[in-house]
Image: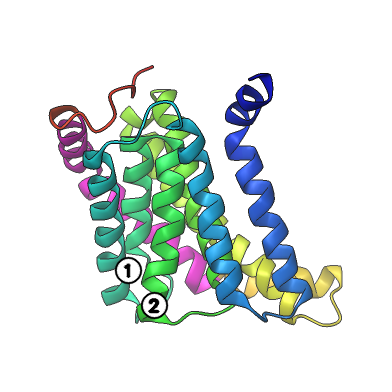
Amino acid sequence: MKQSSLLNRYRLLIALLLMFIFLLFIVLLKGKHYLLFSFMCLICSLLPAYWRFEHDPISTQTLVFVAVLIALAVATRVPLGAIPGVQGASFVVILSGVSLGPELGFITGSTTALVSNMFMGQGPWTPWQMVAWGLMGLTAGLFMKARLSHSLIFMIVFACVWGYLFGWIMDLWYALAYVSPLTIKSFILAFAASFFPFDTFHAASNAFLIALFYKPWEKLFHRLVTKYNILPDKNQ
């Protein structure tokens, strides 16, 4: 019982550690078996929610709502795929965390990467995108609990910062996998190469979408969560 309680308390940390282990394997194996590791990362992203709802089963409404959010995120990513750095999916992932909390925000973000890459193209970058978007949804959920999500200015800054953090996570994968020899200079150059336009466009598009659509969409999602009792323990 004590061990189960400990696992539940550190569920997000355990899931993240497992995902980073799989990312390490991808680097060591030079990108081989990336699809297998992608699904392993997906399973890891589901673990926190599984532990949370072990004694409080997740409702059908919640599953449907998460599925709709993932579909919406995919639908906003694929059409914009031709524009460098612009990721409409990030807006939906941030909203998912704000509306559903860190665990389900983490699931929405990581699953969005895997599903959307079925259209955009799978590769050894997929698990890294799963981690990046998963962390984006997770941190947005943490700020929901701190009530910081009610501040539009804060959310604009948050979304802008995550545009760069997302790019830096992907740069880390690129540097570890393809930069040789890996020195401090080459490592910095790998990060600097994507700063503009990719990371900057991502950050700018995130800030623009949050500034324009965040408040009405947050109210809509909050109304849906309340009306359909999607998260009965949201405020606990």
Q: Position of residue 76 (x, y in %)?
A: 27, 65
- Residue positioned 24% across, 33% down in the render: 230
Q: Tell me the SS state at disc 1.
A: helix
Classify the position of the N terminus by image quarter: top right
Q: Please determine whether, in this image, residue 138 is positioned above or below residue 227.
A: below
In the visual, does 179 lie left or right of 161? Answer: right
Q: Label 1: few (<14), some or many (≥20) within 10 Å?
A: many
Write the start and end of the magenta stretch as one range.
196-225
How many circles with numbers are drawn on the protein? 2
Image location of residue 129, percent across then percent down:
52, 64
Residue 169 x/y as whole percent: 61, 61
Callout 2 amino acid:
Met
Q: Residue furthest front?
A: 1
Q: Is residue 69 visible?
A: yes
Left or right, 47 with respect to 83, comes to right
Q: Which mark is first along the chain, 2 or 1?
A: 1
Q: Amino acid at mark 1?
A: Arg
For label 2, the residue is: 118
Which disc number belongs to residue 77? 1
